[in-house]
Amino acid sequence: MKIEMNVNGAARVVEASPYRRLLDVLREDLRLTGTKEGCGEGECGACTVSLDGETVNSCLVAVAQCHGRTVKTVEGLAAQQGDKEILHAVQTALVRCGGAQCGICTPGIAMCAADIVERELLHDQDLQQARVMVRELLAGNICRCTGYQLIVDAVIEAASEVGLQRRERASRRTP
Amino acid sequence: MSEPLYARPTSVAEALELRAAHPDWMLLAGGTDLLVDSNHRKVPVGMLDLWRLAALGGIRQRDAAIEIGAGTTWLEIERHPLVRVGFLPLAEAAREIGARQIQARGTIGGNIGTSSPVGDSLPVLLALDAEIEVASVRGSRRVPYRDYCVGYRKTALAADELIIAVHLPTPVASTRMVWRKVGTRKAQSISKVMGAATMVLDGGTVVSARIGMGAVADRPIRLTAVEQAVVGLSLLQAAEAARAAVPAAIAPISDIRSTSDYRRAVAANLVARFFAV
């Protein structure tokens, strides 16, 4: 069937069997190979994308269910400024903190981390609570390299950075 | 491979017509169970997509009960004030089903539809005496969840019926409600044993109790023998009576996750703790 969806801000049309996984259509038909397959069972989170604003496992979504909906993959996290790509705060924080090693889980982690940061889920939490929250919110993303500490560091850095920028912008608007 | 048919109804009436015409189609909502390992499973002849069908969503107060639409996700259930205030064990179970990606897609209707012995919300539905509202083109009816699951992944749902909503009666004010899941890790694990209980207390004495457990039999079960054994006892006595009565009230299997002996011991401790806390 013909499936129309918005992927990373652009309208895309694919001809695909309705039962195919969103994960496979993204990787094979749209050549967006940033999204990885880990387990194919919804356990590991490597295939996480945003679907209508919620982070989901793309291995558990039938592509027909995406008709008329909005998908964002790791390729859509960075902002485009002219011909320059500006990485998302969580991407630079993952690099800076060493929150990525082999890289298979990283796109899924980046999608979940961006969701945490953009929704300001850590707002008003002290550092200890924030760390506990990040661990719960990333419980569906399995990483076998880092031991998670540096990933948690990165999410907290990105959250405070983005929060700081928001507060600065807000204070400039109210003189 | 032939391509399956696909339909996304926009009303319950349309969904029921489609269901009546195609009882062999896969009923799909969030897909967190049905699409696991889907590349290695038999392709369905058709898919009836109920995801975000508006009439199957939402949580509402209905007289002395709340009504949860079958398409409501765990994330929506966990956050909803009516659930958090009046039915905390359901919110707690919702928060322990998979992780956030699963909670954003998995629905309560899906858990009921599959009725796996390890469906995490199902012991809670038993303890809360939930009724399942189902409908077909022939009309609608309500089935208490204790009569709904009739065997290993077997339910009372007829071939032309759809799950519409869950109705949870508001418990009397002095009711204590508890929930506990035991798994391999804190998050994202399939339960070894889990259970929920509601108990009406008079001072420190148990007036009545309902105990639902999962992963201890071929289906989610009420522990009626244990419920009867604790009536009239103090909470401490009830804990000991429950610990003694649980092993004979359940029939757990040994599998890759646990042995039946382990499940018996953990289930007894878990139910004892429901009373002793």
Image (cartoon, helix red, strand yellow):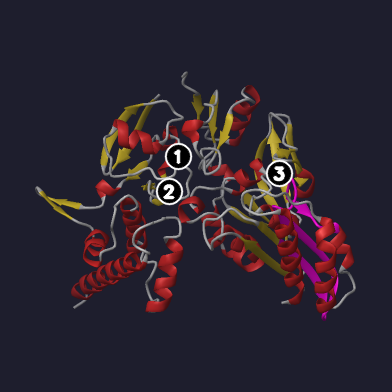
Which quarter of the image is occupied by the C terminus of chain B? bottom right
Q: Earlier in the sequence, mark 2 or mark 1?
A: 2
**Residues at marks 1 and 3 on the same chain:** no
Q: Is residue A61 above or below residue A74?
A: above
Q: Is residue B256 above or below residue A95?
A: above
| Mark drawn on residue A56 | 2
**Residue B208 covered by magenta stretch:** yes
**Residue B221 covered by magenta stretch:** yes
Label 1 marks a residue whose chain is: A
Check whether the beta carbons of the residues at disc 2 and disc 1 lie within 8 A of each other: yes
Kind of residue at badge 1: Val
User: Which residue appears farthest toward the left when viewing the image?
Assistant: A83
Check whether the beta carbons of the residues at disc 1 and disc 3 lie within 8 A of each other: no
Mark 2–mark 1 Cα distance, whole angstroms, equals 8 Å
| Mark drawn on residue B89 | none
**Can residue B2 be seen at all in this image of the molecule?**
yes
Kind of residue at badge 3: Glu
| Mark drawn on residue A61 | 1
What residue is disc 3 on? Answer: B133
Kind of residue at badge 2: Val
- x and y percent of residue B93 in the render? 61, 60
Examine the image and state in which quarter residue B266 appears.
bottom right
Q: Is residue B253 found left or right of A78 in the rendered image?
A: right
* Extent of the magenta region: B196-224
Q: Is residue A61 found left or right of A95 in the rendered image?
A: right
Mark 3–mark 2 Cα distance, whole angstroms, equals 28 Å
Taking depth in this image into account, of A121 and A102 the one nearest to the observer is: A102
- x and y percent of residue A124 in the render? 38, 76
Label 2 marks a residue whose chain is: A
- Please name the residue shown 19% across and 56% down the image: A87
Magenta span: helix, strand or loop, mainly?
A: strand
**Can residue B168 be seen at all in this image of the molecule?**
no
